[in-house]
Image: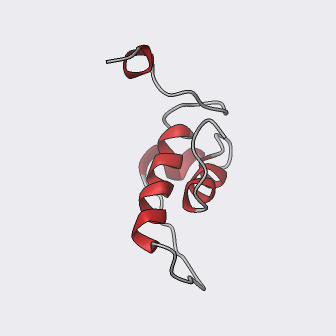
Amino acid sequence: MNVFDIIGPIMIGPSSSHTAGAVRLGRVANKVIDGRKVEKLNIYLSGSFAKTHKGHGTDKALLAGIMGYKSDD
């Protein structure tokens, strides 16, 4: 275990759950896509993600993760 397992991820943005967490979700989508060409991708948000996605940067974080970026990029 390292210190980041306890205090959370290194991240850029206002809220770790809405930015670093969203990047992680986007990276999962990136792995599912697995290099295939995608013409359209629909993302449906619920709960607090839906309420605050633009203000907390969740929308940008999801796209960054889908493009392969990490939360500390």
Foreground pick, 12 / 35: 35
Frontmost residue, 36 versus 8: 36
Residue 35, image x and y in percent? 51, 75
Taking depth in this image into account, of 60 and 8 the one nearest to the observer is 8
Q: Quadrant of residue 13?
A: top right
Residue at (31%, 18%) from the top-left corner? Answer: 1
The quadrant of the image that shows the C terminus is: top right
Indicate the position of residue 67 as horizontal and vertical percent values.
61, 61
Residue 46 lies in quadrant: bottom left
Residue occupying the point 45% across, 73% down: 33
In the image, 6 versus 17, the foreground residue is: 6
In the image, residue 63 lies at what x, y percent? 61, 59
Residue 21, compared with residue 69, is above or below; it is above
What coloring was used for the rendering?
A: secondary structure
Q: Tell me where residue 36 appears, x and y as whole percent.
A: 51, 81
How many callouts does the rendering have? 0
11, above or below 66, in the image: above
Q: Residue at x 48, y 35 (%)?
A: 17
